[in-house]
Amino acid sequence: MSVQELQKTATLEHTADGHHHSDGILGEQFETLEQQNTSYLIGMWAFIVQEVLFFGAIFTAYAIYRFKYVLEFTLAHHELSVPIGTLNTFVLLFSSYTMARAVRAAMQNRHKKQAFYLFLTFLFAGVFMVNKYFEYSAKFEHHLFPGGDYSAHAVVEHAQKMGELREVEENGQKFYELGKTRDGQFTAFKRVTPQEFEQRTRLFFGFYFVMTGLHGLHVLIGMIIIGILIGRALIDHAKNKPVADFMPVEMTGLYWHLVDIVWIFLFPLLYLIGR
Amino acid sequence: MTTTTYTGTDKPNYLNWKTSVASWLLTYDHKRIAILYLVSISIFFLLGGLAAAMIRMELATPKGDLLTSDVYNKMFTTHGVIMIFLFLIPSIPAVFGNFLLPLMIGARDVAFPRLNLLSWYFFMAGAACVLIALFRGGIDTGWTFYTPYSSSFAKGEVSLAIVGVFLAGFASIFTGINFLVTIHKMRAPGMTWFRLPLFVWAMYATSLIQVLGTPVVAITLLLVAVERTFRIGIFDPNLGGDPILYQHLFWFYSHPAVYIMILPAMGVISEVISAFSKRRVFGYHFVAFSSLAIAIIGFLVWGHHMFSTGQSIYAGIVFSFLTWIVAIPSAIKTFNWMATIWKGRVHWDTPMLYALGFMGLFVIGGLTGLHLAAMATNVHLTDTYFIVAHFHYVMVGGAIMGYLAALHFWWPKMTGRMYPEGWGKLAALLVFVGFNLTFFPQFILGYMGMPRRYHSYPEEWATLNVLSTAGSSVLGLGYLLPVIYLTWSLKYGKVVTERNPWGARGLEWELVDTPPDPHNFERTPIVTRPAYDYNHPEEPTGFVPKPRPVVVGGKDG
């Protein structure tokens, strides 16, 4: 007997009569389990569409300023740590894999296996957050958090070392020239005042913190939900429940893949392009 | 199985089967959540109306004597923010959408009852933030939160108000997701897409906008709050940002948001017009698809708010063209409603009066929209009272007239009491006359060049402004009357026990008790006829199947 058939027999008594109180699987408003499950799926996809537009607006704003202040943003993004970003990308990708395994285990009603894979997913999410913590701390240390003590000093120093920024003085006023050094020869593309440079790199780090912060918030919410699901799976295992509703895991899986794919876009846009 | 037939008030219904406060605040019943929304938005409507009254009183005289310009700024901001985010956006969707969608499609509830309740709590939390911000000194940004008014130059608790709008926005998104899934998956057997009442089609189009548009304004406002907190120049030109970008992102939602307000009202009008003309809505398919067309094209016209704020002229031409296209589905609706009334047996009950008022006012509001959609006239009319008059014709003359039509039409179904018809007609008349008296002079004022958002004006505009203020007091009375007599009718109104007091078609009238049973239908109905089948009065739209006989000890037993 397939899983779907098992679940159908488990709720047959509900479909026979009008209104009824379910034993926890079939909601009172639904007629059949199939109706309930597809409703959940459509609802989750609608929520994901909503999330895409939510992040889409901020990606749009970022793209516009990336285009407008391309040199400043490129210099600022050198401060981001590619190794940690890469590590986090792989951590999240792997967590998506374990999540998919958890969904599969839930569909097969293998509660222990499901709990195990959910736990692995939770663990990877935790690793991601710990890495994020170290990354954020480093930014705070270099005064790159756009708060009261923000300073583009670290960006300027680094850019000078790479030969992409040079300080010039004209009529007693200080300027930064942004450009490239080739064969010991500096070519300036753009001249900005230190104040402008500070504002624009501040804008970059503003985007960096808002975008990765919102994403991190999504990871945290995912961890809470996964934590609850682990508990439920363990209870199902302890009670030796033959059939449990796999939809919560399925939907959390969809959400988790969304969180993953947002990062798949964030990583190259913030960390990689321009290198 | 016992089949006791209750009649009238002794039968347990959704209002009286549980009475504790918790049974209301923790209810998953879509009908009770609708009532929660109804009570809360009514309060917000009165608050917003109070601010409007202050504005009109100030403008009764040319001198800025009643309010200082600062307080005046706060007043119109209060009026706009409350009326739009706390009243118009949730009005018909959250009250009548919640109450009616499951009844109309033959379902026991919406697809996600818990999400539905959560949305009300999000809404109330948002409303609390907005109100706290307003009472702690108010905000003076205008309801649009335009930067840099809202970032560099703002006084007061702008960030808190933004958080409030953000939360209310997510309440709206949750409602949208819920309705989309409900319409897709919860229709009773036989309720095909083209048997759906047109209100359901309108709600479907509205939900699409809520899900696709609202997240954009949510993140945009969040960015404003971030800009204010951390001095990041996302939208502030002094810090390297671009205020035009804010306007793009804001109107990407806020223009479609106008359709969140008007589309459900259009759905209501379709229901009311056919019920009181006793005719099937003419051109059903066209009216249904015009809702979707408005929702889709509505996403492509936001730039017409920015013709004079530094947008490229070529973008302006495209936006102007697309805006004109919106007139087509709107006209399709209007002409089809007129064709529905034509040769119908028209009953002049209060809901019908509001519906007819809607049609007249919406036509004026829509056509003056074309003056603003044309770039050449827009330059002359933008930011004048012409615009104020235009959007009040659409939102007040359109959306609120539709809301009042719905409130009177479904009042007996919701409460089991009839409102007093004479008072209802008087109020409808007062609203119509008062509304026109208030806002028609503003078209002329705007054409003469009176700018919006100033608390004083030259002497020569005094007459028209006095007229407008006088009209607003008539309008205020027109709004106050229903508040009084509807509340009165809860206790003293004529008791309605029959299911279908209007002789209307639709599952909610034919198969649902008055007031509805907590479970709506005895069991899931089967739909056999299209909506509005007034030509076959003997044929019900659907029926509730008999219970399956229970065979004790049989194979199933």
Image: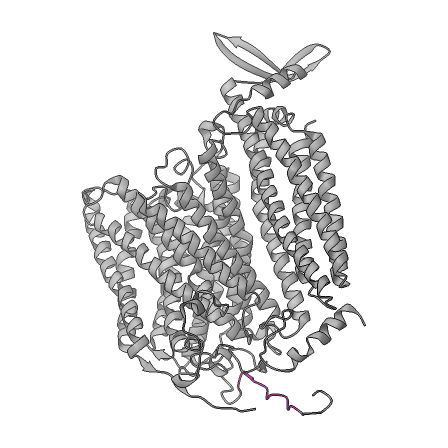
Residue B302 percent location from the top left of the image = 49, 47
Q: Quadrant of the N terminus of chain A?
A: bottom right
Q: Image quarter for residue A179?
A: top right
Residue A128 in sight in this render: yes
Q: Residue furthest top?
A: A171
Q: Which residues are magenta?
A: B540-550
Left or right placement of residue B361 versus residue A231 in this view: left
Residue displayed at 29% across by 64% down: B479
Residue B204 in sight in this render: no
Residue displayed at 42% across by 79% down: B515
Residue B369 percent location from the top left of the image = 41, 53
Left or right placement of residue A155 versus residue B99 in this view: right
Dominant secondary structure, magenta: loop
Q: Quadrant of the C terminus of chain A?
A: top right
Of residue B224 and residue B540, the one placed in the foreground of this image is B224
Residue displayed at 68% across by 48% down: A122
Of residue A234 and residue B444, the one placed in the foreground of this image is A234
Residue B165 percent location from the top left of the image = 44, 49
